Image (spheres, grey):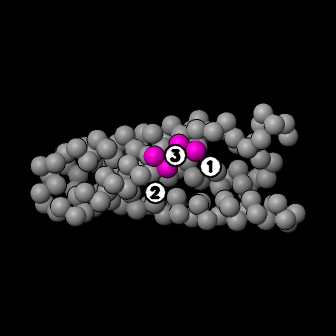
Amino acid sequence: MSKKHDKTLSLDKWAPIGLLAIAAATVVPLLSGPTAQDAVWYRYLFGAGAVWLLICRLFSRYYESDDRLKRLRRIESWSAIFFCAATFFLFWPGAAMRDWLAFTLAAAAIQIYTSLAIPARQKKIANGGK
């Protein structure tokens, strides 16, 4: 592997900005309850975070030879797609809170799984294990 292709062509290091925007926007309607319908700004913050995360995940390139690690990176990209689906339900007039929250929780579960599995797999590869 050359120095140029060491780990990634990394937009991935900017992904936490999108995750923080999504987290902040998710907390607003949960804490404010029914009055959150008046404040629509959190929808735009959530949407911006979801789109930013999707861009970061789709335009990050990894140069790993391990197939399991490649699959984990691909699964990680699905969390951004689920966050974008949640954004759709935030703006759809007929949707209830449970609709976008279900996609948000599914994406968060995928994100948590991959954030634990990717470093564990990298450590195992570094130790020479399969």
Closest to the observer, 2 or 44? 2
> Which callout, 2 or 3, points at the residue further toward the start of the chain?
3
Q: Which residue is mark 2?
A: 107
Q: Is residue 16 magenta?
A: yes
**Separation of marks 1 and 2 at Cα, in angstroms:** 13 Å
Determine crowd level at label 3: few under 14, some 14-19, many 20+ residues with C-alpha closer than 10 A: many
Location of residue 23 in the rendering, given as x and y in whole percent from the top left corner? 37, 56
Magenta part of the chain: 13-17
Residue 48, can we see it?
yes
Q: Residue at x 84, y 36 (%)?
A: 2
**Separation of marks 1 and 3 at Cα, in angstroms:** 15 Å
Q: Is residue 44 above or below residue 124?
A: above
Q: Residue at x 64, y 51 (%)?
A: 73
Q: Is residue 8 above or below residue 23?
A: above
Q: Which residue is mark 1?
A: 74
Location of residue 88 in the rendering, given as x and y in whole percent from the top left corner? 32, 44
The secondary element bearing badge 1 is classed as helix
Q: The residue under label 3 is which amino acid type?
A: Ala
Residue 82, can we see it?
no
The secondary element bearing badge 2 is classed as helix
Location of residue 17 in the rendering, given as x and y in whole percent from the top left corner? 45, 46
Q: Is residue 31 magenta?
A: no
The secondary element bearing badge 3 is classed as helix
Location of residue 106 in the rendering, given as x and y in whole percent from the top left corner? 44, 61
Determine crowd level at label 1: few under 14, some 14-19, many 20+ residues with C-alpha closer than 10 A: some
Determine the image quadrant of residue 26.
bottom left
Q: Residue at x 69, y 40 (%)?
A: 8
